[in-house]
Structure formats: structure tokens, C-alpha cells
Image (spheres, rainbow, N blue to C red):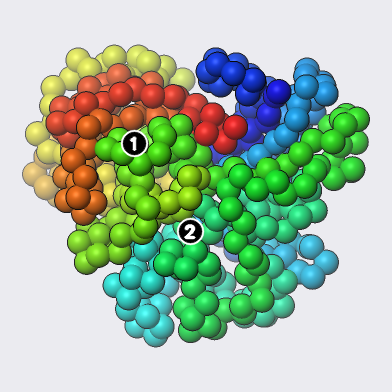
Amino acid sequence: MKRIAIDLGASNGRVVVCETGGGNIADTMDIVHRFPSHTVELPTGLHWNLPGIYEEIITGLGLAVEKYGVEIASAAIDSWGVDYSLIDGKGQLMFLPYHYRDEHTDGIPERVFAEIIPAQELFKTTGVQIMQLNTIFQLYAVKNDHPGIVASADRYLSIPDLLTFWLTGEKINERSHASTTGLFDPSTGDWAWELIERLGLPKNIFGPITPSGTKVGSLRDVVKRSIGADHDIEFITAASHDTQSAAYTVGRGGQNAFLSCGTWSIIGLERDKAITTDAAYENEFSNEASGFGGYNLLKNIMGLWILQECVVEWEGETSYAELIDAASDCSTPEVLIDVNDPLFMKAHEQAGPMTGRINAYLKERGGTPIRIPGEFVRLIVESLADYYGKTVVQLEEISGVKLDRIHLIGGGSKNSLLARLTQEKTGVEVIVGEGEATAVGNV
């Protein structure tokens, strides 16, 4: 039986076909279509071009059907977290979804804390790490700037929820993605209704929470015609936040942590219940609903985004493998960067070249500016591993679990220097896991 994973990352998306009839799913993986995650800079800010992404998905589904035909039984979708859409009563998209790096949330968290709910109380209620990009702050910004849009909306849909609606006609709010919003209450497993009311958001736009692994329906007839399918293809909810699909490949609970490393790095460990202690708040941890039904205590770290932005500047000069080799030959930097510093959050279009920001950071702290790509890569990877080391200490203390091993999954698993330095910095055995963990976990 073949299943399709529609796997959308912050930098690129894939339509992947895998066999689930036994053996290793990853060994059967066929990436039939890969495409960039389209963004567009409009006068209103940085947005996701969701119609463009939808067209890419249709192309990928068509290629999958052309190659495998009636062997394809089902499909599911996962994507990056927090971003969302609003639709009206006729199912029309009310605006192109904002990109989480857009500036429309500048100053919004501080307003929410002053006017609605203190930061620590918000964490106690939702269990979500306080970050400017969270859905709660995005929705509050739109409500204040464009109150008519929110007031007239019919439904809130996350990015994968919206694409599920376009593909199947069914409106859902999948559990793992809902838990990234800062509007979900892990103690009840439902929306944080009192918080939503305090924010002045209409309750009617939030639908029932749909568990991961739910059969939603089948592809719409118009979609089937578009992709050349003459049989029903069932649509199922994956753990639609890509982190949770990736974490699913590690297995449930125990003393094994996951380190999902891509544009973002997420270190986490599954627990039966969310942990919202003072220590979890103070150390900026988060709780997300896992595909297994529990909650992953985790921390969001900037990840390979910093390196990706540098590579944009070096386009065509050298390959990724050559950069890693060059970095391996470089010495340990005298000053490391704080990879979670807001200085490194925004894209080069908004904040200038990443290499310039890195050198400004180093100069301010007495470090020597660097110019060679290999030295930049060494600095970034060493800084990431150092941050992972500190995070693992916090994770063990907050969870009360002594880790046996860390499973390094996602694109970062292909970076041998990162794996080696992570083991050195954390003092925990690192197992290099599935590079395509989000797609495999989805399936």
C-alpha cells in the first residue's frame, strides 16, 4: 500500500510516496516533486503564496498518480507551525497568510502582556514558549489593525488545515498544529476558551480539535480530475506540525530525546502531560501535542536558518558538503554567537546580510570579524552545538529524566560535524536518525 506525504518545510516542500506494506518506510521513499515554499513581499508585508504552494501540491499529486496509479491509498499533510489563515462563510481566503518572520507582530507580545494577560500566566495556560511569531500574537495584531476581517471570519485554519480544506472540502483543526498557537489549553486538550474571550477573538471561528491519525475524507472530485486519479484517495490527518511528524519516527516516551534539525532546531522529549512549571517558563520551553497523544516538552532554537541565510550570499561559490569539510578543518571560534538572539531572526531582505550581522555581534563582544565561509560555518555549527548542550541540561532538570541518547533527525542529520559536536557538548550519545524524518513520520 502506497501513501503520499505532503511535507511542507519553511524553505521547501515535497510530495513523497512511501510503501507501508512492511520493512523500512524510508527505504521506499520516492520524492516525486520538490519545490520552494513560495513567499511574496507585498505592501502589507511578507506573506506565504498559498495558492502557489497549492499548485505545486497538485503538480506533485499528479506526478504520483501518473507513476503509481491505483496503488496510492491515502495522503496526509504536515507543515511548519504557527502560521494560519481565515476564511469567510463561503470558504474564501480572507488574506494571504502572513509569514511568521513578518514585522506585523513587532511590539504585539508586550501589548498582550500589558493589556490582556501576563507572560507567565499565558505560559501556565497554554504551555507554549513565548515567541513573537506565535499565532496568538499574529491574530491579535490582525484583530487590532484590521478588526473587520477577524469579526467577519467564519473559520480559523492553520496552513495544513487550509490545504486540507482545499483538497477535501473538510474544515478541521488538527491537534498538534493547534497546540503551537498559544491558544490551546493542554490541561483540557481543547482551545483555551477563556483566553480567546479575553483577547476579544470570536469563539465561533475555532472548530473542534481533530486528533492526529483521523480519517478526514477523500480528495474532492475536482482535485481527482486535476491530478488524473480515477479512484478515491483517502485523506488522513498526520501530526500536521512537521516537528511532531519528525518526532514520531523516534518512538514514544522513554529516555530518548529527539533533535529535529532543519531551518529550526527543536530538542524535545515526550511526556504524558504538559509541564508548565516556573523552570519550564524561565528556560523558554514549550509543550506541543505529540502524534502519540501525549505532549513533547521541547525548546525551539533558531537552527540552520542562520547557515541557510549565509549560503544565500555564497550562492554558486561552493557546495554544502565542501562548506562542512572546510568548517571541520577550522579551529574552535574564540567567541560563539547566541543562536537565539533576535538579531538573527529576520531574512536578509529585511535585516541585511547574515554574515554582516554575525560580524557585528562578534565585534560588539570583542571577537574578531571573519570572512572565510568555512569559518562562518564552523562558528554557526559550534554555536548550535553549544546551545544544544545547555538545553539538554535544562531538559533533564525540568523533565526529571536522565537521557540515554539523542536522535538527530531532519536535514541536520547529514551534517557530520554537527553530530560530532552535539555529542561532545551534550555528553549524551547521539544517534544519527532519519534525514527525511518529517515525511516518514507523516506516512
Q: Residue at x 52, y 77 (%)?
A: 193
User: In this rendering, is residue 328 above or below 253?
Assistant: above
The answer to which image quadrant residue 6 occupies is top right
Q: Compared with residue 218, is residue 279 higher up or lower down, i.e. above or below?
A: below
Place of residue 216 in the rendered image (x, y in percent of width and height, measured from the top left): 72, 49
Camera sees residue 433: yes
Say which label, 2 or 1, has the lower sequence index.
Answer: 2
Location of residue 149 by image quarter: bottom right
**Which residue appears at 60% of the width and 61% of the height?**
209
- Residue 38 location (% of width, % of height): 62, 42
* Figure disc tally: 2
Mark 2 lies on residue? 179
Q: CA distance from mark 2 to mark 1?
A: 19 Å
How far from the left and from the top, in percent, is residue 437? 48, 30
- What number is the disc on residue 259? 1
**Is residue 418 rendered to the left or right of residue 210?**
left
